[in-house]
Amino acid sequence: MTTAQARQDLAVQPTPLALLLLGREADTRSERGVECPGDLPSPSDPDLVERARAAKEKLGEKVFILGHHYQRDEVIQFADVTGDSFKLAKDAAARPEAEYIVFCGVHFMAESADILTADDQKVVLPDLAAGCSMADMATAEQVAECWDVLTEAGIAERVVPVSYMNSSADIKAFTGKHGGTICTSSNAERALNWAFEQGDKVLFLPDQHLGRNTAVRDLGLSLEDCVLYNPHKPNGGLTAEELRNAKMILWRGHCSVHGRFSLDSVNDVRERVPGVNVLVHPECKHEVVSAADYVGSTEYIIKMLEEAPAGSKWAIGTELNLVQRLANRFAADDKEIVFLDKTVCFCSTMNRIDLPHLVWALESLAEGKDINVIQVEKETADFAQLALERMLALP
């Protein structure tokens, strides 16, 4: 065998997932897009801010810009409204006069906006590669296979799916089709209470930590009531008996940002900052949530800091862009706000929406070019909307 033949035999053929991660392929059933046509302006262009202002002014009432809390400051400054994902989707639906909804967030958020807005409105994502690692952890095929496993275990008819807002349109549609509801980090307790009135088991997708924390902290279930379904193992790595005994079937997914915080992070910040209040998002691990002083959604975190007394000290366990923004906002009120971990941790996919991408998107729209329009297929959108409507009807 020649050296060349040996090298050819040893050559590893990249898998579809590897190609996806390398940006050489696209998966339309995944949160992660990879194509962004067009020439972006240089990030060093000193006129970027003025170009964004000029394009937005030219578009006028035709454009409505949404900015998620985790976005960079350079992008947030151009947002007409800021908020969490569901609030922004509802804000978009309340602006029927806007021809273009520019969503500075990630892919699943733009999908939700497309589902909730009118058919003649176009939802634009400035960079299609702005996905969500958590949402990517549950694909339509994997969840369908999971449902087959639950059916074979004889419990599917007693299981109610509850899917976190941070999921793809496909997963939301699955949830609607199987009698379930969507939840946010603010109303997860209400969603689970509703679900347990419909059945005696919940399949919680895709964030295991929000599901576990809500079930144990808010509903009083035990950790033993929860099992973890791993889509990469046969039958989810669970026996039929384990599935039958469980009340919460948690999907093995997590947020790459909130999952980084640890119990050591909490203990360390308490040593570094005497008298600190630890405030974390419920997407954090259960041991972190258990050790924190306060736990709540992004909107809850902001409200807590707004109402905090002057001179108070806070360590925040959520995305760093937001923490830095809040620290700057409340510095004049003598509120000390620090990041829970020593390690810098931005949401890498949120940060893909930068000023060059926003400028490119706005200037393209101002020139009459429809770019990066997010469209959810009708049947998927209809079932996803059904699940969202169930959430809106929660008591």
Image (cartoon, rainbow, N blue to C red):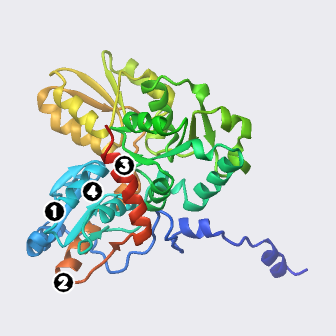
- Image spot of residue 360 (x, y percent): 25, 74
Q: Nearer the viewer, residue 173 or 287?
A: 173
> How many marks on residues?
4
Between tags 2 and 3, which lies in front?
3
Q: CA distance from mark 4 to mark 3?
A: 16 Å
Q: Is residue 154 left or right of residue 326?
A: right
For residue 167, above or below residue 21: above
Q: What is the quadrant of residue 75 in the picture? A: bottom left
In the rendered image, which quarter contains the N terminus?
bottom right
- Image spot of residue 332 (x, y percent): 11, 31
Q: CA distance from mark 1 to mark 4?
A: 10 Å
Which comes before the other along the chain, label 2 or label 4?
Answer: 4
Between tags 2 and 1, which lies in front?
1
Q: Is residue 282 left or right of residue 327?
A: right
Instruction: Write the residue at 37% across / 35% down.
Output: 190
Q: Which residue bears the numbered disc 3?
A: 390
Tag on residue 367?
2
